[in-house]
Each structure stands twice: as structure tokens, then as C-alpha cells.
């Protein structure tokens, strides 16, 4: 299984497990859940462009459907529509302010837009909420590289390497 599909499958499993929202799929508008499920199947099969409209439909039926904002944000990121992804991740953060994933993903979208200071703020907020330290340090390192602060980026990257198992460094 390719890395991209592995990541998508992991995100799908977390969403199905209900990690993103405090609400329950059983209390959600069934039309919203159906649209989301259709989009999720497309995501798992790598059809991100087709998944976006399904997530938009889910949001139209239930404007508080946090996972739909997150998935639509992922779809928009993969289509390189970083400003729209930023909006979706921001909506996700408004609905789930204690979830590190939203901050980390918005940081990536902002970094892609050249908004490095805001991206680093998001990565730090993600870290404060318990995001994986290696991911945070990689995000900050990427932001510092864009600002051409190479020594600081190297320190950030090497901090992330400390968290990897020995076999992964070799």
C-alpha cells in the first residue's frame, strides 16, 4: 500500500472511530452522513477531486460536521488549493478547538501559501495540544527553510530525529 493511501486510511479509521467530534453519527442528519460516507469511499480509493463535492454536500446538510471540513481540507490541499484548505481547517478548528490535527493541517496549508509565521504558530499550537513532536519539528523546520533560516531549520529537524526509533534513522 502506498504511503499516501496508508495516511488516508489512517485518517479514515480515526474519523470512523469518532476522534474528531464530540457528536455522534447517530445524531447527525442521515443525509449528511450519507454524503460524507460517499466522499470517504472516494478518498480511500484516491479520488480526492470527487470527494470534495460530497464533503460540501455533507456540510450543507450539517454545518457542524467537523470531519467533513477536515476531509474537504485534505482534498483541497491535494489539489493545491491551499487558501480554500486553510478555510476548511479553520472551520474545523472552530468546531474542534482542542484537536491538534486541525492546527497541524492548517499550518501545512499556510506554509504552502508562504505564511510562515502563521504556520509556525499553528505548529506550536498543535504541539501544545499534543501533536506528535516529530511532526511539529518537521513543520517548523520546513517553515524555517522557507525563510532561509538554515541553521534554525537544521536544529528543528534534528530535534525531530531524536523521536525516531534507531532503525528509522539508519
Image: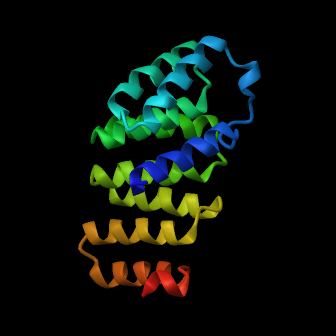
Residue at 53% over, 63% down: 124
For the residue pair 157 and 32, the one nearer the viewer reads as 32
- Foreground pick, 151 / 69: 69
> Does 21 appear above or below 59?
below
Question: At which x and y percent is residue 109?
Answer: 37, 48
**Which quadrant would residue 120 be assigned to in this image?**
bottom left
Location of residue 137 in the rendering, given as x and y in whole percent from the top left corner: 47, 72
- 152 left or right of 129 in image: left
Residue 153, placed above or below residue 37 = below
Write the residue at 52% across / 51% down: 103
Q: Residue furthest front?
A: 1
- Residue 27 image point, x, y percent: 76, 19
The residue at 43%/54% (across/down) is 1
Residue 158, position in %: x, y? 43, 84
Residue at the (28%, 38%) spot, across then down: 79
Q: Is residue 164 left or right of residue 153?
A: right
- Quadrant where the C terminus sits is bottom left
Instruction: Out of 46 and 73, give the one closest to the viewer.
Output: 46
Extreme residue in the left direction:
148
* Quarter-of-image position of residue 13: top right
For this view, does 60 lie left or right of residue 50?
A: right
Amino acid at each position: 500500500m502506498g504511503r499516501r493511501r496508508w495516511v488516508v486510511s489512517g485518517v479514515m479509521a480515526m474519523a470512523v472511530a469518532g476522534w474528531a467530534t464530540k457528536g455522534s453519527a447517530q445524531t447527525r442528519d442521515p443525509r449528511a452522513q450519507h454524503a460524507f460516507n460517499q466522499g470517504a469511499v472516494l478518498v480511500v480509493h484516491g479520488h480526492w477531486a470527487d470527494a470534495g463535492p460530497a464533503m460540501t454536500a455533507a456540510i450543507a446538510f450539517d454545518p457542524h460536521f467537523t470531519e467533513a471540513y477536515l476531509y474537504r481540507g485534505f482534498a483541497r490541499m491535494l489539489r493545491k488549493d491551499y487558501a480554500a484548505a486553510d478555510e476548511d481547517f479553520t472551520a474545523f478548528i472552530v468546531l474542534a478547538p482542542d484537536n491538534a490535527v486541525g492546527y497541524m493541517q492548517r499550518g501545512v496549508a499556510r506554509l504552502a501559501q508562504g505564511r510562515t509565521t502563521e504556520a509556525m504558530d499553528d505548529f506550536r499550537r498543535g504541539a501544545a495540544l499534543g501533536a506528535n513532536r516529530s511532526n511539529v519539528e518537521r513543520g517548523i523546520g520546513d517553515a524555517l527553510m522557507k525563510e532561509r533560516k538554515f541553521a534554525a531549520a537544521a536544529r528543528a529537524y534534528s530535534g525531530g530525529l531524536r523521536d525516531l526509533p534507531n532503525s528509522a534513522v539508519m
